[in-house]
Amino acid sequence: MAAFGIPVAAMILAAPLAHAQTDIEDHCKAQGGTYTQSQVSAHFGQDAQLQETCTIGNKSTTWTNGVQGPTYGG
């Protein structure tokens, strides 16, 4: 049974997560920006963090779990 558990866990971790539209995405698209989102986990078993990026022109801003981080470019 343990041999079955590992492949199943790997499939679950690799499955795409449902895309939830956020206020950041709405604002970015309203400004004509390109929006991307991903969920990342630093270590196996840790809760995933939502990483969002909005690029408008040559300026990109990143948010982690809704908290604004650095802006690059421009």
Image: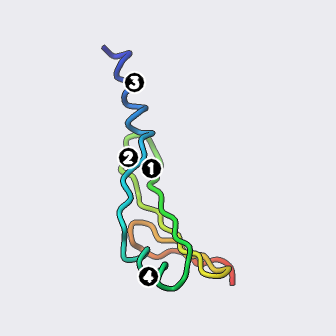
Whole-Å distance between the Cαs marked 4 and 3? 40 Å
Mark 3 or mark 1: whose residue is earlier in sequence: 3
Whole-Å distance between the Cαs marked 3 and 2? 17 Å
Name the front one of labels 4 and 1: 4
Q: In x, y percent, where is residue 57?
A: 65, 82
For the residue marked with disc 2, what is the amino acid?
Gln
Q: Residue at x 41, y 73 (%)?
A: 67
Q: In x, y percent, where is residue 60?
A: 60, 76
The image's mark for residue 46 is: 2
Q: Residues within 10 Å of mark 4 (few under 14, many from 20)?
A: few
Nearest to the observer: residue 21 or residue 68: 21
Whole-Å distance between the Cαs marked 4 and 1? 25 Å
Whole-Å distance between the Cαs marked 2 and 1? 6 Å
Q: Residues within 10 Å of mark 3 (few under 14, many from 20)?
A: few
Mark 2 or mark 1: whose residue is earlier in sequence: 1
Taking 16 as reference, is 56 above or below it?
A: below
Q: Which quadrant of the figure has residue 5?
A: top left
Viewport quadrant of the N terminus:
top left
Q: Secondary structure at mark 4?
A: helix
Q: Secondary structure at mark 3?
A: helix
The image's mark for residue 6 is: 3
Q: Secondary structure at mark 1?
A: loop
| Residue at mark 4 | 27
